Amino acid sequence: MKKIFVEQIIDKINQVVELFGWVHSKRDHKKIVFIDLRDRTGIVQVVGNESFKSLNLEDVVYVKGKVKKRPKKFVNPKMKTGEIEIEAEDIKILSKAKSLPLPVDTSGYEINEEVRLKYRYLDLRRERMKNNLILRHRFIKEIRNFMDEQDFVEIETPILTKATPEGARDFIVPSRLQPGKFYALPQSPQQYKQLLMVAGIEKYYQIARCFRDEDPRADRSYGEFTQLDVEKSFTSQEEILSLIEKLLKNVIEKIFPEKKIWKVPFPKITYKEAMKKYKTDRPDLREKKDINILAFCWVVDFPCFEWKETEKRWDAMHHPFTSPKKEDLSLLNEGKYEEVRADQYDLVLNGFEVGGGSIRIIDPNLQKKIFEIMGHTQKQVEEKFGHLLEAFSYGVPPHGGVALGLDRLLQVILNEPSVRETIAFPASSGGKTAVMEAPSEVSEEQLKEVGIKIR
């Protein structure tokens, strides 16, 4: 006999089984005491004697007993195991639990989020949160399966890297071995995946961790997030869009069969059309806000540049490695920067931006010109991007890519009010990490080692 999960006992009538789990609820009927035993896969009723009276909610227990059919009048149609129960022969308390600081048998929406994140290890016991994490696991697993079938190679890129201007604030990490110098956590693997194209990999992807010091929102977790990062050589915008449409159709049909994708291929709207018709570049195309309808669309032909009034300079609307559309290069040379369109595409789902990408610049001279338009001096370009420009001088294939924000994508598919409902240990809206309450102070010795003083 070996330990099995609750979901495995339904067809084991009159067999003796061993289960491990938590006491989900208890009902005392004097000489008979009922508990609901919960494990990762479900809940089952266990019938015990007076020895069960000492059990507390959320005690961790071992139960050995016979699987019996419930009397018809006691069948619970709301439970997967509602037609059976365990007639206990033995029970052992493996770990006692004191009273919980928050309930775990509700949806959790009614509880203050700061409390939920402080006790996240308890919050994750609730059915909804556990299911979200399992669905996330299955979703990412199917992404990997699909990308492997399409002959893409998963390659990890460094977490300790170099600070480069990519649109958000960097998280910086001091170097002990090179005092006074700093690493930066990657805002995305953008330059590394382009270097992999120079290396001849041709088809790259990664389930990548990205770090940006941006203010949190309901659809954006503070500090870090996970994205599907993709890059392909010898490709086109149409090919990349088609790849992602096939990927999402394939994965959603397998993991979320109750969901209906509104249109395939996804509708394609220009930035200008979206702003004119919907007053936003993240349009919600659903005619009715049905929770099971997934209305994907592509927004294309974004402006290549946007004017930063406070800084009195042009900046890349997407990022500086995005190629202008070929037919607009003459406008670039004429200095009509506001008219230049980018070979860029954003993926929108039900009014949320869930991904984006572009065809990249491969001409070092054009790349230098883009940096100059953005206000970088020749020295700054060399310091920040010299490695990329040199790499491009050794033969670089035409390439492009895309990234999907998996946290936000799952938030929208699952109809969750916050992206934090799809992440195991997210930071709070105030920037504190769940449970650990980082950031925190460090010792004088640690600061001295890296040559830093707090002013």
Image (tube, grey):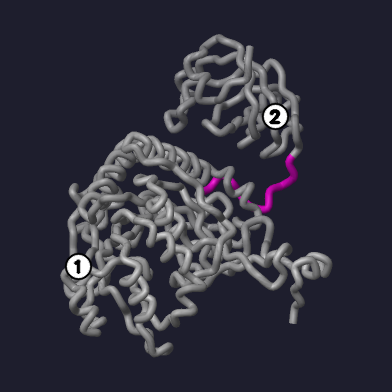
Q: Left or right? Give the position of 392 relative to 296.
A: right
Residue tagged by mark 2?
61
User: Quadrant where the C terminus lies?
Assistant: bottom right
Q: Is residue 241 shown in magenta?
A: no
Mark 2 residue element: strand
| Magenta stretch, residue numbers | 97-106
User: Quadrant where the N terminus lies?
Assistant: top right
Q: Amino acid type of disc 2?
A: Val
Q: Is residue 105 shown in magenta?
A: yes
Q: Amino acid type of disc 1?
A: Lys
Mark 1 residue element: helix
Position of residue 28 relative to residue 133, above or below, is above
**In the rendered structure, which disc, 1 or 2, sits on the residue that comes first in sequence?**
2
Between circles 1 and 2, the one closer to the viewer is 1
Give percent across and percent down for residue 371.
Answer: 38, 76
Q: Left or right? Give the position of 114 relative to 236.
A: right
Q: Residue at x 32, y 80 (%)?
A: 306
Position of residue 430 relative to residue 358, above or below, is below
Give percent across and percent down for residue 196.
Answer: 42, 51
Position of residue 240 relative to residue 57, above or below, is below
Q: Taking the image as drawn, is residue 257 in sight?
A: no
Residue tagged by mark 1?
326
